[in-house]
Image (cartoon, grey):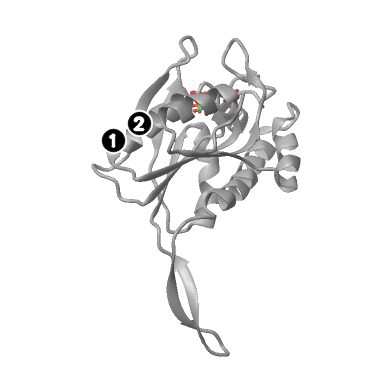
Amino acid sequence: MSQPPTLHVSSHPAILHKLAVLRDVATEPKKFREVVRELSWLLGYEALADVQVRPRTIRTPIEEMEAGELADRIGLVPILRAGLGMVDAMLELMPTAEVWHLGLFRDERTLQPVEYYNKLPDSATVDLCLILDPMLATGGSATAAIDVLKKWGAARIKLVNLIAAPEGVAAVAAAHPDVEIHCAALDRQLNEKGYIMPGLGDAGDRQFGTGKAG
Ligand code: PRP
Ligand code: URA
């Protein structure tokens, strides 16, 4: 399957190394959360490479110079629950970002997203929204989140995932060809239960120690 030009899969060695730890069934929740955070930082660094910067005059101990400061207002939109683990790292990168929580879970039977929480204000307050969710499986949750953000008035949206399935990438690209997708890995396919293969199991359960992974 050819991939859309909006898909960016990182090939950085640090990301490959951390992904192996994340995927490993023996990795406990504490370590899993640490690695989600570290991978989020690295992916965020790549996803934010094209944000707008404006000049700012500062004085170093030696002389005055024209430096830069972030001009774009960034909105982080973690998809509850699993996206929560990606927020802190992104806030370290972009301390002035706003965080808007969106609660979506995937109905286990239909695999359709169900919205249960939305903390967005009436109209868009940011220039660029980063949707944070470790997993892009069928793409139902991501597509629903993008729909919500576009109705809200978001001008630019990027999706940041740790692991994506080709099915999810195709669904997002078909519904929202303007949305860039940044991920650490593009895996093989979904299984009959809609889990990514080889994947890492259930990203929410593995972060929060609930349920059974896989
Ligand atoms: C997971 C994941 C995504 C969604 C991806 O969330 O974090 O939000 O599934 O699947 P999709 O691409 O097929 O929609 P889940 O519904 O398990 O909720 P949780 O984060 O509360 O565990
Ligand atoms: N959600 C997860 O947490 N993992 C998958 O493999 C698919 C959806």
Is 95 located above or below residue 7 in the figure? below
Q: Residue at x 45, y 15 (%)?
A: 107
- Give the residue type at disc 1: Lys
Which one is in front, 86 or 164?
A: 164
Give residue 203's mark.
Answer: none
The quadrant of the image that shows the C terminus is: top right
- Give the residue type at disc 2: Asp
Q: Which residue is mark 1?
A: 151
Q: Secondary structure at mark 1?
A: helix
Which one is in front, 88 or 171?
A: 171
- Residue 76: x and y in percent read 44, 46
The residue sitting at the left extreme is: 122
Q: Residue at x 59, y 46 (%)?
A: 43
Q: Residue at x 69, y 39 (%)?
A: 31
Q: Secondary structure at mark 2?
A: helix
- Residue 114: x and y in percent read 39, 21
Is 68 located above or below residue 62 in the figure? above
The reply to whether the residue tagged 1 has its Cβ within 8 angstroms of ligand 1 is no
Which one is in front, 211 or 17?
A: 17
Q: Which residue is mark 2?
A: 147
Determine whether, in the image, residue 85 is placed left or right of residue 54: right
Mark 2 and mark 1: Cα distance apart in space: 6 Å
- Residue 41: x and y in percent read 60, 49
- Residue 82: x and y in percent read 52, 32
Determine whether, in the image, residue 128 is placed left or right of residue 166: left
Q: Quadrant of residue 188?
A: top right
Tags 2 and 1 touching, CB below 8 Å = yes
Mark 2 residue crowding within 10 angstroms, few (<14) / some (14–19) / many (20+): some
The residue sitting at the bottom extreme is: 62
Q: Residue at x 54, y 28 (%)?
A: 169
Q: Quadrant of ligand 2?
A: top right
